[in-house]
Image (cartoon, rainbow, N blue to C red):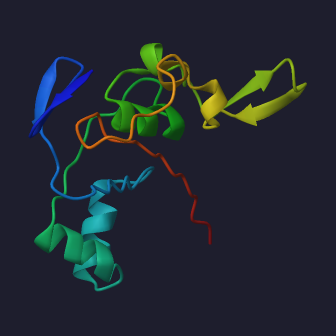
Amino acid sequence: MSAKGTSITLNGRTYRWPGRPVVVVCVDGCEPDYVTRAVEAGAAPWLGEVVATGTSRLVDAVVPTFTNPNNLSIVTGVPPAVHGICGNYFYDREAGAEVMMNDPKYLRWLRSRGPAPRSPSSPPRTSCVGCWATR
């Protein structure tokens, strides 16, 4: 990973350095046409605005196709074999319990790199926030 001036190179690819914070929203676990129809029906006005004025993309899932491995692959740009999140839950022997795998202490890839740099000339700080909507 390296950063210089107006570009950043991650995992062998070079990107333009963002001029302002970037937010990625992952709509997970549904057929994309559900979102399209909700926007067209006026039931999802914020998503409609994002599609009309921002960027909207479909992505291929990583295997396994669970929420946590896919979201962490989006954030880190690497597959589950590298970032270490291979499912939504696992059995933590030390805790003696099944735990969510999205706790940073289970993230090999970031943990191995130490504290996140904060300098504008360094790679950006990355956050991954998960929330589940239920009805």
Q: Nearer the viewer, residue 123 or 120?
A: 120
Name the residue at 17% across, 50% down: 18
Question: Closer to the camera, 40 or 13?
Answer: 13
Q: Is residue 9 left or right of residue 74?
A: left
x, y percent for residue 10: 23, 25
**Residue nearest the observer in this picture, 111 or 51:** 111
Picture layout, residue 97 above or below residue 27: above
Image side of residue 36 versus residue 82, left or right: left
Residue at left offset 16%, top offset 59%: 55
Q: Is residue 1 left or right of residue 13?
A: right
Give the vertical position of 6 relative to 84 (above or below): below
User: Which residue in the rendered view is the most extreme toward the right?
Assistant: 96
When the figure is inspected, residue 50 is found, relative to residue 67, above or below; the finding is: below
Residue that sits furthest to the bottom in the current view: 42
Instruction: Quadrant for residue 124, please give it.
Output: top left
**Residue in the picture at 15% in, 43% down:** 17
Please give left or right for residue 10 compared with residue 100 in the image.
left
Give the percent coordinates (x, y) of residue 82: 43, 15
Q: Position of residue 94 (x, y in %)?
A: 87, 19
Count of marks placed on residues: 0
Foreground of the two, 80 or 40: 80
**Residue 106, picture quadrant:** top right
Q: Position of residue 22 (x, y in %)?
A: 27, 55
Q: Identify the image quadrant of the N terminus.
A: top left
Q: Quadrant of the C terminus?
A: bottom right
